Image (cartoon, rainbow, N blue to C red):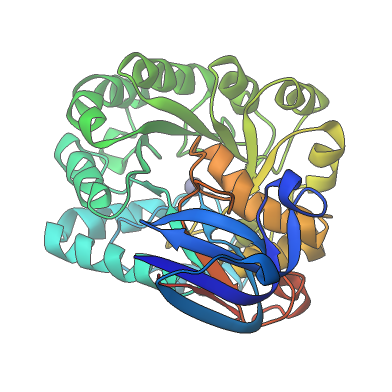
């Protein structure tokens, strides 16, 4: 069964050879989808026949958003913590323990139901690829089941046993790291594609450079790809460590030294910016302009989680990136699609060239620019083919 999608006023392909600029933008375009993949793309006037026809009526279409950073296996609610923060209590990551308690007490079915609801919520807003981390179990059994639940929803699963040191291990932080790199990793590696660590030496809850290195090296030795949370609350060793270990992505990058920027620019590691976090913690935003001008590959993701940023909306993050991070609308859209695909090292998504997965987000607008031009308006949806 093939489907002709036509009536596309503006089609972003992220394939520069297909159209204008880095977005490979085509006007009055069409594409043909067969067996879940893009089989043809080009001017609507030249489109071949197909078994079925969908007319978008002059709307824009873009690759489905690739949200390469979420924490969606959890239970509980932290609205009170958010309210306190907006009343002046600073964010330091300590509230994660609240979610850990609730997550440990929840059944597998409850965690799975909640995750599926979030995945559907994201899909309804145009997100077609979702990375999901563990990190609210923090015991061997609770981390392993978090990843089992996540793997039912997405192939992009990340072991984050080193999210924070759980309260019961606060007196023996290195002992907890040995647990993460030993039995926890052994139980989790089969359910995960990636290993990640919250490297933030200034935080009382997260991990320093040596601990982060131990976690990432062990994960890599177990066959997992490397990702790092670094530079969220202050500069630290996480960015250089990630680049050294060949990380697919270093995430947050709010506080960077010149050496961090130079190392990212000279590597294939993506800098993933999560501006919803700064919005939701009332913190200074990262400087995307500095990274882009240095030649760093930049991705945008939500970091959707119950503490520091509880949005699943990629369009909201695009609007923030344009308004607050110094990105152009085209750079922000690329970062939220092709950038995310690079951060997940998945070349089948984040683009709409022939052979790509047919993940199409339709915008109730004539141009992708409306994603930033009309913040907060639910323009994006996923095209079900
Ligand atoms: Zn995160």
Give whichever of 50, 374 is nearer the camera. 50
Q: Position of residue 209 (x, y in %)?
A: 54, 21
Q: Position of residue 179 (x, y in %)?
A: 25, 24
Relative to 296, 158 lies left or right = left
Relative to 105, 167 lies left or right = right
Q: Residue at x 60, y 53 (%)?
A: 337
Q: Residue at x 18, y 34 (%)?
A: 140
Give whichever of 77, 89 is nearer the camera. 77
Q: Residue at x 56, y 50 (%)?
A: 350
Give whichever of 191, 146 is nearer the camera. 191
Q: Position of residue 333 (x, y in %)?
A: 69, 58
Q: Residue at x 45, y 51 (%)?
A: 357
Q: Position of residue 292 (x, y in %)?
A: 81, 40
Q: Quadrant of residue 108?
A: bottom left
Q: How many numbered badges does the structure rendering display?
A: 0
Q: Please, is residue 330 above or below residue 85 in the view?
A: above
Tell me if residue 286 can be seen. yes
């Amino acid at each position: 069964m093939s489907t002709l999608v036509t009536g596309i006023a503006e089609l972003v392909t992220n394939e520069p050879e297909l159209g204008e600029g880095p977005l490979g933008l085509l006007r009055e375009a069409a594409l043909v989808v067969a067996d879940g993949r893009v089989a043809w793309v080009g001017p609507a006037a030249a489109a071949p026949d197909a078994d079925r026809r969908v007319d978008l009526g002059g709307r824009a279409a873009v690759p489905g958003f690739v949200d390469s950073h979420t924490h969606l296996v959890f239970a509980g609610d932290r609205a009170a913590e958010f309210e306190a923060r907006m009343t002046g209590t600073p964010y330091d990551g300590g509230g994660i323990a609240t979610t850990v308690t609730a997550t440990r007490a929840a059944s597998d079915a409850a965690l799975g139901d909640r995750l599926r609801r979030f995945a559907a919520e994201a899909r309804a807003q145009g997100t077609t690829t979702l990375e999901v981390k563990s990190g609210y179990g923090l015991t061997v059994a609770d981390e392993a089941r978090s990843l089992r639940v996540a793997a039912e929803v997405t192939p992009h699963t990340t072991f984050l046993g080193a999210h924070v040191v759980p309260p019961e291990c606060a007196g023996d932080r290195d002992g907890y790291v040995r647990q993460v790199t030993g039995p926890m990793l052994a139980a989790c590696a089969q359910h995960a594609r990636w290993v990640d660590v919250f490297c933030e030496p200034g935080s009382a809850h997260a991990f320093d450079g040596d601990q982060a290195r131990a976690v990432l090296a062990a994960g890599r030795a177990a066959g997992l790809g490397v990702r790092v949370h670094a530079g969220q609350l202050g500069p630290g060793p996480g960015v250089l460590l990630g680049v050294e270990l060949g990380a697919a992505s270093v995430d947050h990058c709010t506080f960077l030294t010149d050496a961090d920027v130079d190392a990212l620019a000279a590597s294939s590691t993506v800098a993933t910016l999560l501006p919803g976090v700064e919005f939701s913690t009332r913190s200074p935003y990262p400087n995307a302009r500095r990274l882009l001008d240095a030649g760093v590959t930049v991705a945008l993701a939500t970091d959707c989680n119950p503490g520091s940023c509880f949005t699943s909306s990629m369009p909201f993050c695009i609007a923030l990136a344009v308004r607050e991070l110094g990105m152009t609308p085209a750079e922000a859209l690329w970062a939220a699609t092709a950038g995310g695909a690079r951060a997940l090292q998945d070349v089948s998504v984040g683009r709409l060239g022939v052979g790509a997965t047919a993940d199409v987000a339709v915008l109730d607008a004539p141009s992708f620019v409306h994603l930033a031009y009309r913040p907060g308006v639910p323009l994006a949806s996923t095209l079900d083919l």
